Amino acid sequence: MERARQFSRSLVDRASESGHVGERVADVAPSSPESLPASPSELDVPALPSDRLRETDLPGDLPEIPTDGPSRRTLLAGVGGAALGAVAASPDLLDGALNNLEALDVDLPVDPGATAGPGHEAALALVPREGATHRATASGEWSSPGTWADGEVPGDGARVLIEDGVSVTVASRLSARLRTVRVDGALRFDRSTDTHLVAGTLVTTPGSLLYLGHPDAPVGPDAEARITFADFGPIDDARDPARVSRGLVAMGAVSVHGAEKTTWTALASAPTQGDRRIELPEAPTNWQVGDRVVVAGNHPVENQDEEVVVTGVDGATVELDRTLNHDHVPPADALDAYVLNRTRNVRFDSENPETPRRGHVMFGSDEVDVRYAGFYKLGRTDKSYPFTNPVHGEPPEDVPPNPRARYALHFHETGIEGEDPARIQGVAVDGSPGWGVVNHHSHVDVVDSVTYDVFGSGFVAEAGNERGSFRRNFALRSEGSGETVDSRKFHEGGDPGEVDDFGHGGHGFWLQGPAVTVEDNVAAGHRHYGFVFWNRPLVDRELRPGEEIHNARGSVPNFPLEYLDGHERLKESDRATEDRISSAYVPLQSVRDNTTFASGGGLEVSRHMFGYDHPRFEDYGVIEGFTAYDVGPLISHWDEVIQPDRWNAQGGGPAPATRPGRRDEVIQPDRWNAQGGNNALTIRYSHNLRVSNARLLAGKDSDRDGTTGGVGINRNTPYPFNVVVEDSVIEGFDRGVSAMTRGITVVRDVELDNATNVRVRGHDGGPPRRVALSDVSADGAAVSVDLESLEHVDPEELFGRGGGVELDGRHVYLDAQHPDAVPVPTTGDLDQLGREKLAELIDDPESVVGKTNQQLQGAFGLAVHGAIAPPDVERDPRLEGGLLGPAGDADPPREHWFEAEAGDLAAPFRVESDPAASGGEYVVARGVDSHHEPPASGYATYEFDAAGGEYRVYGRVHAPGWGDDSFWVRMDGGTWYRWDGIDARRGWDWVPVWDSETDDGPLTFDLDRGRHRLEVAVREDGTKLDELLVTALDTTPVWMGEPVAGGGEG
């Protein structure tokens, strides 16, 4: 049984609903004016019986389709009617139509029963059947008078209709410039000779076939098949208000296959200036004299791509038409130089390359197989300014029409359902003002293809719920807008042009969603990041009641749970609806072995699982085997240099040199939320990410002043947390890794060689930061720890518990935490810190000036990051700005972790299960309260040996409600403290023990060296206790405690 098909609704539907459509075509069922669902249509379409036709060679002459029995058009009208609630097609009708198709003896790699969604009326209205001047009524060659109803072959300006049930073959270079061609039957190009069709608009309808070769029968290497989109003047808005004309809109099956060839390859050796030949690893497939190739430049700022022509091929040696002007040598061994072949013998191109007059290619069917074809000077959507037909927000003012979705090669809302994706393989997209290869609400595999000189982004997954893959593709060169990636995002009350227009900044790959596999791709020569995973869904429909477009988080459910494999907890979480979840919460599917070089940044991850943080490392999104080198700055659209965190009050250091001829002002990316250039990998507004087996090299001239500069792994503040960097090499940057300011940062088994290897600076709210480094090999200090300058912190951040930093299991203290350190030396420093805010902590802010940590703690209970370094800390060459605490095996230890269920438990405490609890179990009391005073018995008891000092106690707790949010706590049989108002409603969280009677903040217990006893008693039943931490160290626990802090997978 053929899989059930669901109808999708296209952009042209929306135009039609606005009244911008001409005459409706009689044999196409009208679409419902409902808004597009979060993913393609929710209509219940019955499965249709069908057999896939045999794939054999195509005969030279096609017989007429027998007239007995129904035609495909009759069949598809019935199918469409059934889908829309009209008359259903019978099995006999279906079988009869399929038999008629078999009489064609056309070998199809796709299902001839393909249907586009209801609608596409804007395109169909351009080619009404009754408007045709020439009708093909008999199968045969285009140039044969017998093919046409009136015996006249179409000439200049003709409007052509190929009737349903008719197959017309283009077997020569046609001289006529046609206004329109509508294909209800089949349009085929002879694969053995040169063919050429010139038409303004080519529309193929549901059930039709466009055929330019097949995988088993491609257009031969000595032949060329070409479709050119003619320019008959400016697009007429009165006739075509949707501006969908001038191009190919294919709603039926499409089979295109040019001669197979090597599309791109690494070179056997890197060519240098003066070379006139290049050496490939092996003889290329089907490279011929006259092929246009480009050797990728590797300079991070200058365009050093070299367009050359092949003049000879001898095995793996390729001769060029001129000598090369530049060196193409990468900065390290095991890195490659590359060459791309731009020539294909199946071509789609524009007669007029001016952007408003170009053609575009839009597929409205999932039954598409396109291989080894070239798409030249196509696409009209101009990414240099925002599009002008937004669903949300106000369009830009006083600009020419710029509708979205007019791209060079575009799958437009064909549906994500089913197991058989459409396929793009070996294609070349050469020159586009917008995007190159686009998957929009579709299921497509894009393999072994290249884009070159595409302004916005080369390869795109547009909306967030796309499925399929980008595998072994090369995106070379994008000029880009020079704007940062977020600059056009929609938000309520935004300025004109803030319309959720993305992928304009100059990128190789723009991935709005995480579910597309991205493996073995290369991006080079881009104005900004080579790869961007910006995972907040693009909501390209009207919002439903209760929905909103959040500025940073994805909240609109757009991704079917049936495609969310292996993430059962996510499916069962409160982020999911009955059958969908926002793709923003879905971890990256497979991102592996991708490379960026010669670009204004390597890879950015933004809005990944933002708002769904958890400690299960095995469920994190993974960026595996990413390589970045020769990355440089971003040059903004104001011609300013945007660097990553240098030369500002937070970073220090000299200003980088500006580009010759550019304005002198340098914009620093802290102003831009870490969106600047010179970042090999940036993490913004994201949670739960692992970076494994990365190789990040600063390369040459990334500052353009002779230094390297930049950041290996950067982040914005304060949003990203829960990040693991492992088994990686990071070299040559001003800063190797910027630790997250919240949650977990784990750096393990990493080789570092940077001016500053790992910088830990600042902390910002919850969850508390925990940084763990282990098995780090560094040239120089492995980690630099310091405070932000006082003008950039507030008193709570300066004196609050700042989370822990560990190096190989030992705690790290700041120099500023030494007992004799003076946090606020002068009244000027006090002014920078903020007198009014400090007055919220103590009565007399002036009294902190000039006092040491020891004095501040004695007088006010204050110290930098809430703790003074103990006396037995030591200097360590691996640390800059910090002191290393005692080894973990110190006797007795200063830190003790307890599983709550492992204590000595007395009734009413009992053990219950929860997979989210550490070890899967926790402690709770049921059916008993003790609100006013502690119970006389029935405690959970924990004993430990401790070194002398001041200790705090933390509990990992879950308080289901206001009536279930407290315990009684005491140490060594002393005073009972009421630990009330525990704020852990949504799930497990670490909370310090405090005294609710005084509300003076976390309790401090002054313990002597020796044996001690911690007791917990019930106050309100239902309050759950999972773990306990008793610590004299500067430790703020996160997630499941000690294993995470030590760098393991807790």
Image (tube, helix red, strand yellow):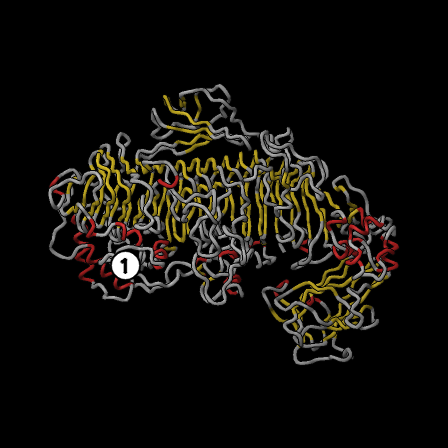
Residue 561 placement, left or right of 88: right
Asked whether 720 or 920 is in front, the reply is 720
Q: Which quadrant would the C terminus be assigned to in this image?
A: bottom right
Say few, some or many: other residues with alpha carbon within 10 Å of mark 1 (under 14 / 14 to 19 / 20 or more). Answer: few
Secondary element at image label 1? loop
Location of residue 634 in the rendering, given as x and y in whole percent from the top left corner:
57, 38
Residue visible at 32% across and 46% down? 236
Query: Residue 532 at x, y = what percent?
Result: 52, 45
Residue 418 seen in the figure: no
Residue 264 horizontal/vertical position (percent):
42, 33
Q: Report the side of 192 relative to 668 (left or right).
A: left
**Residue drawn where x is 34% and y is 25% of the image:** 290
Locate the N terminus by quadrant: bottom left
The image shows residue 1000, relative to residue 249, as above or below, that is below
Residue 482 location (% of width, % of height): 53, 40
Label 1 belongs to which residue?
A: 1
Q: Which quadrant would residue 1018 be assigned to in this image?
A: bottom right
The answer to whether 586 appears left or right of 928 in the picture is left
Q: The residue under label 1 is which amino acid type?
A: Met
